[in-house]
Amino acid sequence: MSNRVHIFDTTLRDGEQSPGAALNVDEKLEIARQLERLGVDIIEAGFPISSPGDFDAVQRIAKQVQNATVCGLTRAVRKDIDVAWDALKGAKRPRIHTGLGVSDNHLQHKLRKSRDEALEMGVSAVAYAKSLGCDDIEYFTEDAGRADPDYLCRVVEAVINAGATVINVPDTTGYATPEEYGAIFRMLLERVPNADKAIFSAHCHDDLGLAVANSLAAAKNGARQIECTINGIGERAGNTSLEEVVMALKTRRDYYGLETGINTREITRTSRLVSNRTGILVQPNKAIVGANAFAHSSGIHQDGVLKERTTYEIIDPADVGISESKIILSPRSGRAALKHRLEVLGHTFEDAAFEKVYERFLEVADRKKMVYDEDLEALATDEARLVNQTYELVQLQVTCGDSAIPTATVKLRHANRAVLMDADTGNGPVDAIYRAINRIVKVPNELIEISLQSVTEGTDAQAAVTIRVRAGDEVHSGHAAHTDIIVAAAKAYLNALNKQLLNQPGRITQPESERVGV
Ligand SMILES: CC(=O)SCCNC(=O)CCNC(=O)[C@H](O)C(C)(C)COP(=O)(O)OP(=O)(O)OC[C@H]1O[C@@H](n2cnc3c(N)ncnc32)[C@H](O)[C@@H]1OP(=O)(O)O
Ligand SMILES: CC(C)C(=O)C(=O)O
Ligand SMILES: [Mg+2]
């Protein structure tokens, strides 16, 4: 038996059966083009009899696709087959996918047919498709996951005799377990006398979250076609996800010994296109294509991945078309991750300065949960400026509002370790802060410009404050960033005053203001 597994993509048929996923014809064509780039073997383009729009889509895809087989779904009904064959006329490699339920549940309640009647319908549908000149006929034994094995074997044997070349054994309701589903394929291959005349195909639904596991079990037991959809979209809980099943076969080739023709580097692009056009978002923790699939956010993992990627990654992100894995800076990140990201952004620090950056990073991370490059830039430049500071902000308390007198209390630490506190009122909170700071620092200056800017997005964004003060002939600028804009304003002012103080002899001398908590 060959070790090549055909990938049958049904994003445009079963995937489009996802509630709310309806695609227009142009979008279907666009997705079909991308599926070809991805290298799928078969594109199930639609159910041509279902609507004029679907007929049109199948017809246009059939004409456009160059390499893949293009397939149209039908019931085991002549008019469906006629319409599908008509839609597939322009295809280089057309396939009719017809079939009928095989479980007693479907026979009794839905089709209201006896086993023999249904078998006869299936056989005539295949024979009819063949009579039209179709030599690639796939037969689906709907709800095979709940069918009587003896009846399933009878149906499969009969439809292969009638001309079916591919036998689809769907677990339509997502009921089977991997062991059971694998065993169905083993049984069919062992018991059906003409089984060697057909390729057996797995088609699984994810009602119990087992679609991928069931498809893999089928492949392990002889299935050589897997039906799947991009992002696992599809009827109810969805279908087998193409990206998961393909990457499982590739990553665990040692276990399955099977190959597909998929160009896995196109996986991410295809996933994004389908999500975009269907409007169905991909959950962040989704395997392979979720936003977090290659993101590391805790310190121990980040340290490991930075030392050697394979400590926590079994797939190289480049293999699925992602340039690199992500290190997400969070309150759980350690020094290794922070240092790495700062270096990537071009910031290096001496050990002591780095410890201060790390301390401030943790403060920001606790407030923001995720720290972005823009936050780091703000944080790093701020710290770089503060290395030579004379005064450092220890604590700030502000009272303001439409009926309160803006009042600020500031506590500063001097370079000689003295902690100084003072308070003042002002026209507004920033004015009050600057007056309180002036009472401690006591360097004459004039505030000539203040600008406030948000450097990241959201209500928890970092605010950056830039100010300029004039002292005699000199102008000093100060810059600081913080998630609290009032704190950023205080730090920016201190930053400017610290620069002013750099030029003053004896700046490390103890100033005269009130000393507290030395
Ligand atoms: C498991 C799957 O995913 S199967 C594919 C599911 N996809 C779709 O159903 C989308 C396309 N479907 C449609 O557009 C429509 O349902 C159509 C055009 C196929 C049929 O529409 P209608 O003629 O109005 O029939 P309706 O949908 O109400 O009922 C389905 C009929 O097909 C019968 N039927 C269902 N499956 C099959 C089958 N595989 N072979 C033969 N008959 C079938 C049902 O028993 C029912 O027949 P009844 O009306 O005699 O009871
Ligand atoms: C039409 C068939 C192949 C199907 O989608 C199913 O049984 O789930
Ligand atoms: Mg299905």
Image: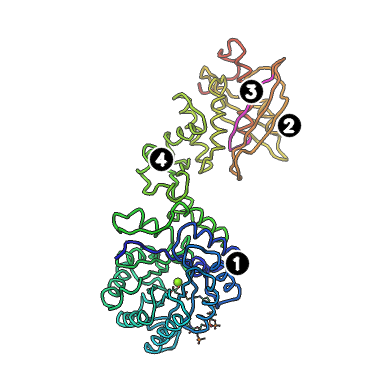
**Mark nearer the N terminus (2 vs 3):** 2
State which region is magenta. Answer: 475-485
Q: Which residue is mark 4?
A: 302
**Mark nearer the N terminus (2 vs 1):** 1
User: Residue 139 appears at what percent x and percent y?
Assistant: 41, 77
C-beta proximity under 8 Å, tags 2 and 1? no
The amino acid type, in three-letter code, at marker 3 is Ala
User: Residue 217 appears at what percent x and percent y?
Assistant: 32, 65
Question: Distance from label 1 to label 3 (Cα)?
Answer: 61 Å
Along the viewing direction, whichever of 231 and 488 lies nearer the viewer: 231
- Does residue 484 show up magenta in the picture? yes
Q: Is residue 449 left or right of residue 344?
A: right
Q: Which mark is residue 427?
A: 2
C-beta proximity under 8 Å, tags 1 and 4? no
Looking at the image, which residue is at 49% across and 65% down? 11
> How many residues crowd around disc 4 within 10 Å: few (fewer than 14), some, or many (20 or more)?
many
Q: Report helix, strand or loop for mark 1.
A: helix
Q: Nearer the viewer, mark 4 or mark 3?
A: 4
Q: Which mark is residue 496?
A: 3
Q: Which residue is mark 1?
A: 25
Q: Quadrant of residue 199?
A: bottom left
